[in-house]
Amino acid sequence: MSEGERRLAAIMYTDMVGYTALTQSDEAQAMEVLDRHNRLLRPFFPRFHGREVKAIGDSFLVEFESALDALKCAAEIQSYLNDYNVSSKEEWKIKLRIGIHLGDVIHQGGDVFGDAVNIASRIYPLADPGGVCVSDQVFGQVRNKVSYPLEKMAPQSLKNVQFPIDVYRVTMPWEQRSSSKEEAPTFPRDRIAILPFANMSPNPNDEYFAEGMTEEIISTVSGISGLRVISRTSVMQYKKTEKTVKEIGRELEVGSVLEGSFRKAGNRIRVTTQLIDVAGDEHLWAQNYDRNLDDVFEVQSDVAKQVASALRIHILSPERERIDRKPTDSTHAYSLYLKGRYYWTKRELGDIKKALEYFELAIHEDPGFALGYVGAADSYGALRDLWGIDHQTSLLREKSLVAKALEIDPELAEAHTTNASVLASEYNLRQAEKEYKKAIELKPSYATAHHWYQLEILRPQKRWDEALAEIKKAIELDPLSPIIVANLGGYYLNKGEYAKAVEPFRKAAELGLSFAHGHLAFTYGEMGMLDEMRREYAIDVEFAQSSVPQIRIVDDAKMAYFEGNIDAVRRLLPELEAAFGAVGPRAYSHMYGFNAQWIAELHFHLGDIDKGFEWLERSYSRRERSLWLITVDRDLDGVRTDPRYLDLVKRLGLG
């Protein structure tokens, strides 16, 4: 275009929400956010034939020849940032307002001028954070050409613009999903959520006891077969919430809510509880307990019985015996155990090690405390499976500890669940299944048992109907657990029902599970939706590279695989193998699909069968959890009759 020439163009103006305030409160953080903002947005412009005219602080001015391209670019950017933000820490979230206008522009000195620029800069403030607004001129070009509804706003008088302009607000896909939700139905009373007990103790360090009290009441009430109890993962998200009981009931799909407070002063405790009917917003039962600390178990068992009575649920004799049984006579051992669980739920390496110390102290205080042994076993399991530390030694300690727990209390559901996972890690699936069934029989509302049972036993054996029933039961009991929700996506992905896998993976990402973006990208790849795949892999890299630096080469290889770029796969494979060796002790990278099994699949894809089996054997020797799923992995379809595959399946207990 000649200097000074006038022409028709679509101008997109973007602006970051809250950036000025951030620069005033933390300039260094603001500069890092701006750098990330620039890196994330710039790749989108050329993809939609846009030309970046200039960056003005936290804003971009971009020119397009087509209004349709401009709108598609804006919508894609906002979709990307919506996915990015749901998994991002608050200080890293990036929200934009975007305005687009179609009109005359003049090029001069590499810049553009004219009404189109002026009006676009006046339109963007009308957009909501995360939204897009367009002028009537743009609307005329894109109507009936995009899937996004465009809602006409009231006529706008814009600064320095002579006449009022019609502006349209673009309704984004997540807004459509939100607005289309129907009023939540009434849920049965026997479906109950036990909310985190408020810590009213004068010592704030007693927070662990309030959390532990909540968890133990959940565990005790879960042992009543007539009740369906929401798991800890979901209810802890309502700690110190300002939401009403009705809002919580609707979100968790429960008919009853138990809430209360805990106060500890010296050797005295005060526990207040109230059971509320969600539909009628009325109290079904309330009770205050003023007791000695030694009586804490009696309080927990009485709460369980009173809840069942208020909801007219009959407690079976074996259940009543388990409810009345004290796990330990030592309140000091119990306090140490609660501290261990407080740290164990955080799952970071330092927290797991600290939890293990407390569990071992609890066992030392009371060698007959079965739950203390389970806690220690779970800690070794986390060190082994999540962090890859001393795999064989940790496994042996885990086995020994859970065996001791079962020797002390053969009716402890948590011990049977941990034992089942140990057996599955040793590929003894037949015995592991018996243990999972026993755990579920003892505690029907134990979401973890349902979750692991379908993942480790049912799915690898292609027992699809049973697996779906178990994962749906786990979600019913723990609807806000991102791991469990993601595993519903994994179920559909393994079964080849890719379209059904998208929503669970997306919801898991919205619940804060960052690596769900990688699984969502893989699903899009299987569906041939390559643009969406690239977007999700970009988010995956952004979140994972600090903890798994090799993730970029992993995701590049996956993109090349789905794009059918054999040369790129062949070029990247040696780098991928080298990166695998550099992972070090952290084994949890299997969550990001970075494992020996995936490298084996790429070799099979390239036709290098012997190399593929070498890497499968490496996966077997490392006891990679994903190896169970080779029976449902389509990349192994070409080697199903190979004796090496049949032998491996047999060793896995799947033959």
Image (cartoon, grey):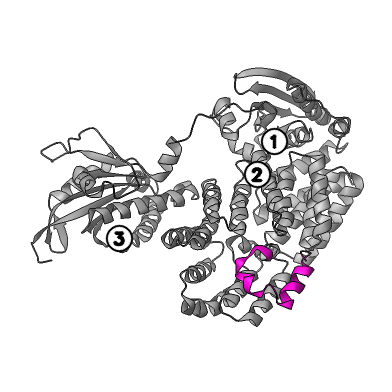
Residue occupied by mark 1? 206
Mark 3 or mark 1: which comes first in sequence? Answer: 3
Name the kind of residue labelled 3 in the image. Phe
User: Is the C terminus in the top left, top right, bottom left or bottom right quadrant?
Assistant: bottom right
Q: Residue at x 81, y 55 (%)?
A: 432
Front label number (3 vs 1): 3
Residue 632, compared with residue 261, is above or below; it is below
Mark 2 or mark 1: which comes first in sequence? Answer: 1
Q: Residues within 10 Å of mark 1 (few under 14, many from 20)?
A: some
Front label number (2 vs 3): 2
CA separation in Å, label 2 and label 1: 36 Å
> Can residue 500 be spotted in the picture?
yes
Residue occupied by mark 3? 48
Relative image position of residue 42 (x, y in whole percent) = 33, 61
Relative image position of residue 121 (x, y in whole percent) = 21, 47
Name the kind of residue labelled 2 in the image. Lys
Residue occupied by mark 2? 472
